[in-house]
């Protein structure tokens, strides 16, 4: 997908480049599948069939029923829909929510809004090494717990959670508790099989993290839990009433193709990312003062570290001048200090000098080497804090 060999894009956890084949499929759909899938004449029926096919491709990556996949505009919308839709109807019998201390803002902020409405929120912090003890979340569940929300892969450190153990433990303590998983950073990076995750009620995914465009995502909603979810939107019958509004058919088609292609390459891509991650770690070990924050069980696509001496934004700007692009953490935090590293107990200097590198299949050794060269030069040239 990369057209400029001198461009070294290493911020794929923020967004990915759109696959040309996906862009072509969207372009074709914009021109040929213009009808409303809810209408009853022939062009609309064709559009509905295309929508169903795209839904089926996403369902196949999750090993779930096609009707358990609902199209949304993004992962953030999926998270909001699942959290608000599950918690508010259950307030008649409970008021406790259990979550982690390093969730994405699209999980963290709806839960804090629910706290303002009278819910009690328990946040379980990650360990100092970035890992999460899911048993602590299970232990916090009681008969009043309406929701447990946890990301499958942390967007800043790549920490991988045992969501199967979490969901099973939660349901064993309270079968009525809803379990929501933010899988935006996990989808098509680690296997997700909903048949092996029977305790997970909802799970969110996003298109622009997997080489589809921004503006399309999906929510898995276990069919036997559909009646217990009260969507925050009112409107038409689209998406079985869960997400009303005329579907974005061309982007749904693009997401389906991206899902199909990503699933085929999942294991190969993981091996490729692991090799790049190992190369980067080896190079960082030769630089002075580097502290790595990603835990041992992190997915290889993400590596978070601190220089300990140069402000994150300063280093990001410096590397940008060399056409090496990384981030300081979640793009949705817009440059704010990392709440994930703060939750891990990292000191202020580590937080202020943190950088996040995130790979995709398009990256190669030249990208890693360009980053390491930039880091080495920057450590020598930039003013230390």
Image: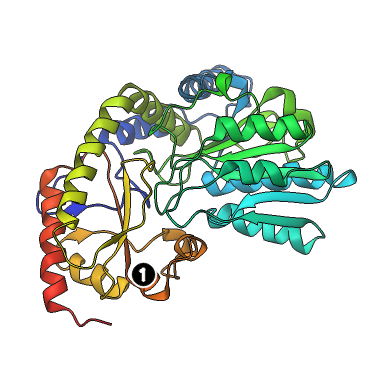
**Residue 285 in which image quadrant:** bottom left
Residue 267 versus residue 146 in the image, above or below: above
In this rendering, position of residue 165 left or right of residue 265: right
In screen coordinates, is 254 left or right of 309? right
Location of the C terminus (image quadrant): bottom left
Classify 181 as above or below 326.
above
The structure's colour scheme is rainbow
User: Image point 78% across, 50% down: which residue?
Assistant: 96
Which residue does the numbered mark 1 point to in the structure image? 350
Q: Position of residue 350 (x, y in %)?
A: 36, 69
Which residue is found at the position 15% from the left and 63% from the top?
287
Using the rendered image of the protein, determine whether residue 12 is visible from the camera's viewpoint. Answer: yes
Which of the pair 220/347 is nearer the observer? 347
| Quadrant containing the N terminus in the rendered view | top left
Q: How busy is the neighbourhood of tag 1: few (under 14 within 10 Å), some, or many (20 plus)?
A: many
- The percent coordinates of residue 11 (x first, y second) are 30, 53
Q: Find the residue positioned furthest to the right.
A: 92
Image spot of residue 39 (x, y percent): 63, 25
As drawn, 341 above or below 136: below
- Residue depicted at x 31% and y 41%: 300
Q: Which is nearer the eye, 79 or 53?
A: 79
Between residues 70 and 313, which one lies in front from this camera angle?
A: 313
Dot 1 falls on a residue whose secondary structure is helix
Residue 233 visible somewhere in the drawing: no
């Amino acid at each position: 997908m990369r057209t400029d060999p001198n461009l070294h894009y290493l911020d794929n956890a923020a967004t990915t480049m759109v696959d040309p084949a996906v862009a072509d499929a969207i372009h074709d759909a914009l021109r040929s599948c213009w009808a409303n899938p809810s209408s009853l004449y022939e062009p609309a029926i064709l559009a509905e069939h295309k929508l169903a096919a795209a839904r089926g491709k996403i369902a196949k990556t999750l090993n779930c029923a096609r009707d358990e996949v609902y199209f949304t505009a993004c992962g953030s919308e999926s998270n909001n829909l699942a959290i608000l839709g599950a918690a508010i109807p259950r307030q008649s019998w409970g008021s406790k929510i259990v979550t982690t201390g390093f969730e994405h803002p699209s999980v963290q902020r709806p839960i804090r809004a629910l706290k303002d409405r009278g819910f009690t929120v328990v946040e379980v912090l990650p360990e100092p090494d970035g890992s999460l003890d899911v048993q602590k979340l299970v232990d916090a569940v009681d008969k009043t717990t309406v929701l447990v929300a946890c990301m499958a892969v942390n967007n800043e450190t790549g920490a991988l959670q045992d969501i199967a153990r979490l969901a099973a433990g939660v349901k064993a303590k309270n079968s009525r508790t809803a379990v929501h998983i933010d899988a935006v950073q996990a989808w098509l990076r680690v296997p997700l099989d909903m048949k092996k995750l029977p305790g997970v009620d909802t799970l969110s995914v996003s298109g622009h993290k997997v080489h589809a465009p921004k503006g399309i995502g999906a929510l898995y909603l276990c069919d036997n839990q559909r009646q217990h979810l009260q969507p925050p939107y009112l409107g038409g019958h689209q998406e079985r009433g869960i997400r009303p509004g005329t579907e974005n058919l061309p982007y749904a088609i693009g997401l389906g193709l991206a899902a199909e292609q990503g699933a085929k390459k999942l294991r190969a891509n993981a091996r490729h990312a692991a090799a790049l991650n190992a190369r980067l770690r080896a190079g960082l070990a030769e630089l002075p003062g580097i502290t790595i924050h990603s835990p041992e069980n992190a997915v290889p696509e993400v590596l978070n570290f601190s220089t300990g001496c140069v402000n994150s934004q300063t280093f990001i700007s410096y590397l940008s001048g060399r056409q090496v692009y990384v981030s300081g953490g979640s793009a949705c935090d817009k440059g704010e200090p990392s709440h994930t590293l703060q939750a891990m107990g990292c000191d202020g200097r580590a937080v202020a000098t943190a950088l996040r590198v995130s790979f995709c299949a398009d990256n190669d050794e030249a990208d890693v080497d360009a980053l390491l060269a930039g880091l080495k030069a920057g450590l020598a040239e930039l003013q230390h804090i």
